[in-house]
Image: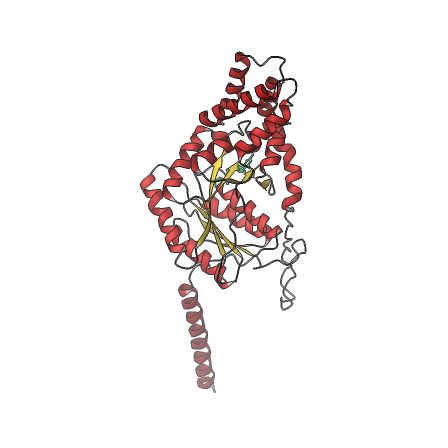
Amino acid sequence: MTVLYLVIGIVVLAAIIAVGLVTTGRRRGTPPPRVDTQAPARAPARDVPVAEPESAAPEAPAAPVPTLERPEDPASRLVRLRQRLAGAQGGFGRGLLALLSRERLDEDTWEAIEDTLLTADVGVAPTQQLVERLRTRLRVDGKEAADPRGVLRDELLQLVGPDLDRRLQISGSDGRPGVVLVVGVNGTGKTTLVGKLARILVAENRSVVLGAADTFRAAAVEQLTTWGERVGVDVVRGPEGSDPASVAFQAVQEGIDRAADTVVVDTAGRLQNKAGLMDELGKVKRVIEKQAPVTEVLLVLDATTGQNGLVQARVFSEIVDVTGIVLTKLDGSAKGGIVVAVQRELGVPVKLVGLGEGADDLAPFDPGAFVDALLG
Ligand code: GDP
């Protein structure tokens, strides 16, 4: 009898060890999770708390129920942000208007107009062009007859380019997602832009996957994960320091697998080594395009950096085909003229503007609203 118990005991012990070995082996063989599956793939009603699974064990402690945020509608945010734009840019536009409204437009006044434009980072060539146009129109029309505000509005609008195609290319073809590659120097607001853009897309009921390919900054990956979780968007990430191209590849793969509408890929922007950056971004783009074409390359520039932003624009445009510019921190800069300068520099339109640190403080760039804000 004792022998029987002994045998049964040994058999049970052996079974326990065997089960233990198998599960440990599986854990070892499991690659690190690529996707933050805490967030649901698609959140149908985004302000509705996510239901807990019915099969949850009754004795398990109740997990906090994540509430998804409903991002602000892009149309209404423009109205709200217009005032912020006016606040930051008023000095430049209103200064011009005050000068043009003077009794006599003498040479000193024209010089002051020129200085105002240059100080606002409009750039030399566009400034000269604008001053010439204003001189002609106000002279030909006759100062008394002309409406300085109307003429200035008209000419500023022409300078900003009312007819440029500023639509984001966020849709793919052949059942594949659109792929937006976001590039720019660190600190310009690139990761924030990816998060805010995801919210705009979610507000438009698009399904989105984010790729955290700025793998050199753990903080950037964490930051993006939080942005994603808030609106129920998956963030594909790799271990710190891993190959950015591999994360980008996985993100697009995930987008294809989930039949997502758009994949947005964040990248690292270390300018110290241009050759290195070129290699890295080139590889990211090549690897993505093994699966789906990149439909939009957004270059993020900090509006407060002026000429420095133009230098960055030049470098990045040599590395990748930039298709749209995002100007961030326009709320903190009175130098809105950079919109004109950077579009001239790259021959590419400004498509989005960042107007604050709030989650929905990003808006499509609207030339008319911009010029109206300039003029106060
Ligand atoms: P990255 O290094 O380029 O990825 O930059 P981050 O996305 O981390 O942003 C750098 C800082 O800029 C953060 O403190 C952001 O909150 C801030 N930022 C980004 N966009 C804007 C904007 O449009 N306005 C303001 N005021 N701050 C912004």
Query: Residue 31, located in which quarter of the rendered image?
Result: bottom left
Which residue corresponds to the image point at 42% horizontal and 36% vertical from the top-left?
A: 313
Nearest the viewer among 10 and 360 is 360
| Side of 126 where 105 appears, left or right | right
| Side of 149 where 222 appears, left or right | left
Residue 46, percent across and down? 65, 54
Depicted 145 relative to depicted 19: above or below: above
Which residue corresponds to the image point at 61% horizontal and 55% vertical from the top-left?
A: 205
Which residue corresponds to the image point at 45% horizontal and 76% vertical from the top-left?
A: 13
Residue 348, percent across and down? 46, 40
Nearest the viewer among 149 and 339 is 149
Q: What colour-coding does the image apply?
A: secondary structure
| Side of 174 where 276 appears, left or right | left
Residue 17, percent across and down? 43, 72
Nearest the viewer among 294 and 196 is 294
Which residue corresponds to the image point at 50% horizontal and 32% vertical from the top-left?
A: 340
Query: Residue 359, located in which quarter of the rendered image?
Result: top right
Depicted 335 relative to depicted 102: above or below: below
Query: Residue 368, located in which quarter of the rendered image?
Result: top right
Q: Work out whether residue 283 can be spotted.
A: yes
Tally the marks: 0
Quarter of the figure that contains the C terminus: top right
Q: Spot the residue most to the front.
A: 140
Q: Spot the residue most to the bottom.
A: 1
Q: Work out whether residue 356 can be spotted.
A: no
Nearest the viewer among 308 and 337 is 337
Depicted 70 relative to depicted 102: above or below: below
